[in-house]
Amino acid sequence: MSSHTGKLWIVGFGPGSAEHITARALTAIQASDVVIGYNTYVDLVRHLLTHQEVVRTGMTEEVSRAQAAVELAQQGKAVAVISSGDAGVYGMAGLVYEVLVEQGWQEGDNPEVEVVPGISAIHSCAALLGAPIMHDACTISLSDHLTPWDVIARRVEAAAAADFVIALYNPKSGRRTEQIVETQRILLRHRSPSTPVGLVKSAYRDRQRVDVTTLADMLDYEIGMLTTVIIGNSQTFVHGQKLITPRGYQRKYDLRETEQRLRPGERLRPEHEPWALHQGRSRGQG
Ligand code: SAH
């Protein structure tokens, strides 16, 4: 092993278009000696590659990809492991750290590690849909390759019951087709069939497609490996082709008034927020 300290960048390059990659991600890819990633991801950043050695791998080879990245960086190379979106959201960041921890790596050891944040699908897809995740939202991956279905189903149930806006990642693939059907069934136990749903395929890439539908009808639309499904909460409404979730449940503003009922500073008074938690209890609950 070289005594020269290597650098391991774990990079999220955003949804896929050149405009949505961060400056830091660009720097990382351009300054690296080796770029490692799933074939499709390497293709999406090909225009940025000049001198870099490229290690392409298939989709199910995440573990060997992480191990190769760590090994090359330990040899003193600058290595960029790339993920679409954010590398810390169903990406490579966790796996790379798991490999390092397994080897006894500590902060300050070789290699130096930097995770570079990127725009995850929940954010790129929400932007195309308008403003669906204005309120509390969560992401759930429907892929049961690495997670037992029972765990996933429990999370869908909990998120549905708690009225979260939900972004479903990995909703469906060629072989995994039942998960989205079962998910719709669980959601319908808690939410109205008319709940707005946005389907975004290939956000900010060629063949981008945006569909706005409802919880009842969502399965009539094309859903695939490159689709993110955003389920509105009980307040979400549709305007044209946009999904809009209000900023709050209890409206403290009236958009038809030029002057708001409450002056700045008055909004936060306890008497104007009877539904809030006041000294251990919500007044709304009596
Ligand atoms: N790290 C990625 C997620 C990888 S999991 C991120 O942060 O975005 C793969 C899933 O992400 C896909 O099944 C899809 O649900 C979602 N996804 C990734 N890129 C997308 C895009 N450009 N448009 C729509 N969905 C996308």
Image: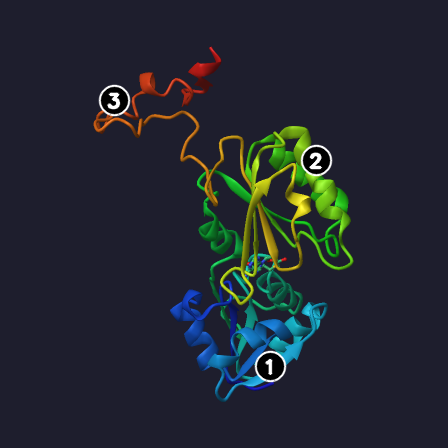
Q: Nearer the viewer, mark 1 or mark 3?
A: 3
Labelled disc at residue 186: 2
Give the residue at mark 3.
261
Distance Cα–Cα, label 1 vs label 3: 62 Å
Neighbour tally class for label 3: few under 14, some 14-19, many 20 plus, Cα within 10 Å: few
- Graded by Cα atoms within 10 Å as few (under 14), some (14 to 19) or many (20 or more), the crowding at tag 1 reads some
Question: What amino acid is found at the position of numbered circle 3 in the picture?
Answer: Arg
Residue under the point 55% across and 71% down: 82
The amino acid type found where label 2 is placed reads Ile
Q: Which of the two discs, 2 and 3, labels the residue nearer the N terminus?
A: 2
Residue 125 in picture, x, y percent from top left: 51, 53
Q: Pick whichever, 254 or 89, lies toward us.
A: 254
Q: Nearer the viewer, residue 222 or 72?
A: 222
Where in the figure is residue 1, as x and y percent of width and height? 61, 85
Closer to the observer: label 2 or label 1?
Answer: 2
104 w.r.t. 213: above or below: below
Rendered location of residue 246, percent (x, y): 42, 34
Q: Is residue 143 left or right of residue 21?
A: right
Is residue 151 in view from this perspective? no
- Where does ligand 1 appear, by image quarter? bottom right
Q: Is mark 1 within 8 Å of ligand 1?
A: no
Q: CA distance from mark 2 to mark 3?
A: 40 Å
Above or below residue 215? Residue 19 is below
Name the image quarter holding residue 36.
bottom right
- Measure the alpha-carbon separation of dots 2 and 1: 45 Å
Tell me residue 203's x, y (percent): 52, 59
Is residue 263 in view? yes
Q: Is residue 279 above or below residue 191?
A: above
Residue 260's tag is none
Identity of the residue furthest to the top in this view: 286
Badge number at residue 72 = 1
